[in-house]
Amino acid sequence: MKKHTALWIILGIVAVIVIWAISANNKMNVKQENATSKWADVQADYQRRKDLVEQAINVVKGAGNYESGTLEAVIKARNNVPQLDANNLTEENIANFQKAYDKMAQEMTRAINVTVERYPELTATKNYQEFQAQIEGCENRINVSRKKFNDAVREYNTMIRLFPNSVIASLFGHKAMGYFQASEGAEEAPSTEALL
């Protein structure tokens, strides 16, 4: 009788541990999926920015006399933006992804500024003004999406790093996800000359 009671106690303890491990893994999966979903939102906002580059090219072309050389760098940068697999969101991969998008944005800004300097009447056109408003809204959405992504990644990473979840995370192959970080040099305020 005592053997059976001890066996049932051991089986009960094992069952509780197994149920707890499955529950912890499911919670990690939910948090990981949430972070992946937030990553999709970031990509959607970046895609919108990429699409606006095409609009920028058309706005400048529609302005009349433009030099196509000023837009070649924008088109090249747009075409060099990589796709990043949601299952491989390491710090390094996110940094490379962000660098490519930052380069595209810089090239677009430079091309538009050069064109506006040469053709100041462009800024008075309705298309250009609408484009400027869309770019501003797009940049705001990107910033919000990045923050939400980082928040979701923080929750997931925290969960998989805390004991005893860390044991379950290693058993089920959960790995830390990377964060978006500020671009290199972003801590320095831009000079006012660059804005003119």
Image: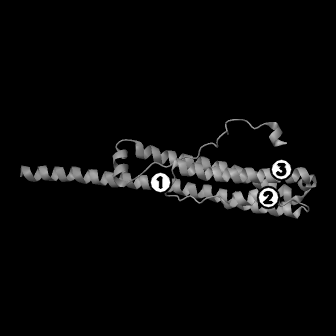
x%, y% of residue 100? 65, 53
Number of marks in the image? 3
Residue sitting at 62 percent across and 50 percent down? 98
Q: Residues within 10 Å of mark 1 (few under 14, many from 20)?
A: many
Q: Residues within 10 Å of mark 2 (few under 14, many from 20)?
A: many
For mark 1, give the secondary structure: helix
User: At label 3, which amino acid type do we have?
Assistant: Asn
User: At label 1, which amino acid type do we have?
Assistant: Gln
Question: Mark 1 or mark 2, which has the lower sequence index?
Answer: 1
Residue sitting at 66 percent across and 48 percent down? 143
Residue sitting at 30 percent across and 54 percent down? 19
Residue position for label 3: 113
**Spatial distance from mark 1 to mark 3, Cα to Cα?**
41 Å
Q: Nearer the viewer, residue 42 or 50?
A: 50
Query: CB atoms at circles 1 and 2 under 8 Å apart?
Result: no
Badge nearest the viewer, 2 or 3: 2
State left or right for residue 49 relative to residue 169: right
List the single residue furthest toward the front.
Answer: 69
State left or right for residue 166 relative to residue 124: left
Residue sitting at 43 percent across and 55 percent down? 29
User: At label 2, which amino acid type do we have?
Assistant: Leu
For mark 3, give the secondary structure: helix
Residue 52 visible, this orientation: no
Question: Mark 1 or mark 3, which has the lower sequence index?
Answer: 1
List the single residue furthest toward the right.
Answer: 121
Residue position for label 1: 32
For the C terminus, the image quarter is top right
x%, y% of residue 106? 73, 50
Residue position for label 2: 71
